[in-house]
Image (cartoon, rainbow, N blue to C red):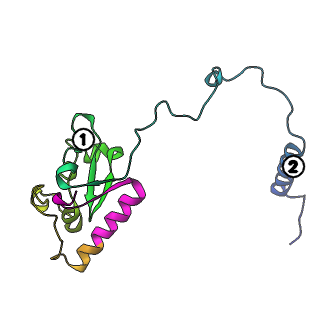
Amino acid sequence: MAFDLGTPVNTALLIYILYSIQRIIFPSSSIPKTVPNEFKHGYTWMPKTHPPTLLFQTYTPKTLAPFNGEDGKRILLAIRGVVYDVTAGRNFYGPNGMYANFAGRDASRGMAKQSFDESMLTPIDQPLDKLDDLTPEEIENMKGWMEHFSSKYIVCGKLVENDAV
């Protein structure tokens, strides 16, 4: 099957290819007559404001509790001793969000068991949950959540017992 210029499809394709090559080799050298409006005052990639500096800290359940997103504050939560800044997910973890009960708390058991009940949270004045009774599937589930949070949010600290600091 040879290339036949007698068919209209082949002729049209050849003309299109030649036109495209001509546009690449000899691009238009005309200068736009007007400057686009959106660039009149210049352009910068810099954001209007920078987020506050976030330092890696050691938290206890009592010092983590105020970071529940109320009054516009940052939102932190912990899973298996790792504290994440989930402020970017305020719609989920902030007040009235579907995961709001995890804000400012150790969410390890709740994430492992896929439960958002208040009963999954250890009271802040008690020792950290050792998670000894979790099944291997629940532990894998919790590890999956940790990978998700590590890739999406900033790790900003570690969670230790109340009397450790």
Q: Which residue is mark 2?
A: 21
Pointer 2 or 1: first along the chain: 2
Q: Residue furthest bottom?
A: 136
Q: Which residues are magenta?
A: 141-165
Q: Is residue 150 left or right of residue 60?
A: right
**Image spot of residue 163 (x, y percent):** 16, 59
Question: If the image is split into quadrants, where does the N terminus sit?
Answer: bottom right
Q: Residue at x 40, y 38 (%)?
A: 52
Secondary structure mostly seen in the magenta stretch: helix
Q: Quadrant of the C terminus?
A: bottom left
Q: Is residue 135 magenta?
A: no
Q: Crowding at label 2, few (<14), some or many (≥20) Cα neighbours within 10 Å?
A: few
Which residue appears at 17% of the width and 71% of the height? 130
Taking depth in this image into account, of 77 and 161 the one nearest to the observer is 161
Label 1 element class? loop
Query: Residue 26: where, in percent of width, then height?
Result: 90, 41
The circle drawn on residue 17 is none
Label 2 vs label 1, nearer the camera: 1
Decide: is 60 above or below 141. above
Which residue position holds label 1?
A: 69
- Amino acid found under the numbered disc labelled 1: Gly
Looking at the picture, how far across and down is residue 107, in whole percent?
22, 59
Residue at the location (84% across, 52% down)? 17
Looking at the rendering, which quadrant does residue 147 occupy? bottom left
Do the CB atoms of the residues marked 2 and 1 lie less than 8 Å apart?
Answer: no
